[in-house]
Amino acid sequence: MSANAYTGRWQIFKYRPYLLYFIGHIISMLGTGMQFIATSWLAMELTGSSASVAYVLIFTSLPGIVLSPVIGVLVDRFDRKWMAVLMDVFRAGVLVAIPFLWWEGLLEPWHLYLATFLVALGDEIYTPSAMSLIREVLPSNMLLYANSTNAIAMQAGVLLGAGVGGVIVGFSSAVTVMVINVVSFLVSAVCLVLIRKGFVRPAAAAEATKGGFRSFVADMKSGLAYIRGRNGILFFYAMIFFIRMSLYTINVLLGPFAKDTLKVGAAGFGYIDACFALGAVTGNLLLPAVTKARGNRPVMVIGMFGIAIALVLFGFSANLATAMVFYFLIGACFQVGILFMTRAQEETELTYQGRVHSTFNTFFSLLSLGIYLGMAYLMENLSFRSLYVVQGVIVALAAIMAYRALYARGAKVKMAGDVSG
């Protein structure tokens, strides 16, 4: 990593609000890393079906489909810090119910699906709130470092959480993992409370709320009008769309692939998932320096082709070792999405951050629902290996689209700070 990139990354920790956010974020991600393993494994145990993982993820996508536009307006109107704190507490409260039902011998699959839906609802409000909060407390030239460091925190937590979660599930139970995640959400809430004192509403929010329901609808419409015609925002979110599609797919496939194809058990499942996080941490550590040296455009395009190749190679994994190596590569290449997200943030005015993010999140949620429903069917009729290959081909086609937009029609998509020409 270059000296400038190294200095820039550490400089963000001079901002006390960001430091507190980072501490809470990495602890919360530790619990979340464990949660994915625990929920997937518990769903398969309760139902005896690999498709249950897809059903769990379907309930994860539902809140975003219905509520994202409304959530975006709320984020742009109310104190983002307190909205994020409330969602941490809410998610902790939901997860407490699962261990209680388990210990009483009352836990059924629908309980798990409902809890998944409610936690996802909390996620839908927390994510744009936290993203907008970071956009508030940091200058624009620090966003790439912040987003990259946030991703490192997330993946470092997932890295440790996935590995430890698989071991805990193997030697104890999935509900033990959920108790740990409850604690992690509460720690995150405390850190967010300490970011700043008082109650701070976004600019012009007071005037907006005086109009009641009509002004609420008007705010939703103004968010859509803001997006319309802004080719830069549309392009960057379109690429995020394809990257997230791949993530949704591998999330559905990994548990059954580890269990039924590779036959590596819960611990092996956790090790493979941890390799994604390890690759993500590595990719994020290198991302600012590589981008500074080579420019945004080549890193964006090459990164997407890298995702495609790594997906295909992972689909042909013969054992645990090769699966871990290729999943590491997938995790490393996936971090190119941070470049697309950072550029989308830079293209969006602060006043519209919540609405823009939530509007696109609605489309992402619809996408994820379609993928999860489709995968629930396809996993019963096609091999897991072939599904990874198909996903790799789709990402390769998206990479070609990115190349054409950034080079063949590069004038239509401005790339600030691109040294590659």
Image (tube, rainbow, N blue to C red):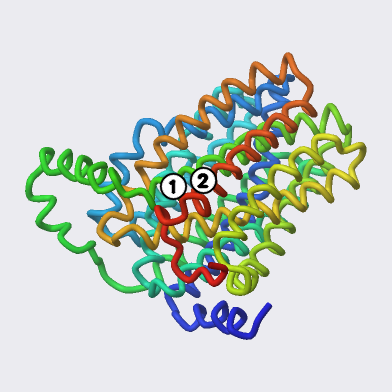
374 or 123: which is nearer to us? 374
Q: Is residue 186 left or right of residue 6?
A: left
236 or 92: which is nearer to us? 236
Check disc 2 and report its element: helix, strand or loop: helix
**Which residue lies under the disc numbered 2?**
239
* Residue type for callout 2: Met
Which percent across, then down, holds residue 189?
45, 60
In which quadrant of the rendered image does the N terminus lie? bottom right
One can see residue 99 in this view: no
Q: Are marks 2 and 1 in contact (CB under 8 Å)?
A: yes
Total labels: the figure holds 2
Whole-Å distance between the Cαs marked 2 and 1? Answer: 6 Å
Number of residues whose C-alpha sits closer than 10 Å to that of mark 1, classed few (under 14), some (14–19) or many (20 or more): some
Check disc 1 and report its element: helix, strand or loop: helix
One can see residue 342 in this view: yes
* Residue type for callout 1: Phe
The quarter of the displayed image where residue 212 is located: top left
Residue at horizontal 61 percent and vertical 60 percent from the top: 298
Which mark, by number, is residue 235? 1
Residue at horizontal 54 percent and vertical 80 percent from the top: 8
Which percent across, then down, holds residue 95?
54, 41
Q: Is residue 285 left or right of residue 412?
A: right
Number of residues whose C-alpha sits closer than 10 Å to that of mark 2, classed few (under 14), some (14–19) or many (20 or more): many
Which percent across, then down, holds residue 111?
55, 27
Residue at horizontal 58 percent and vertical 44 percent from the top: 243
Which percent across, then down, holds residue 20?
48, 72
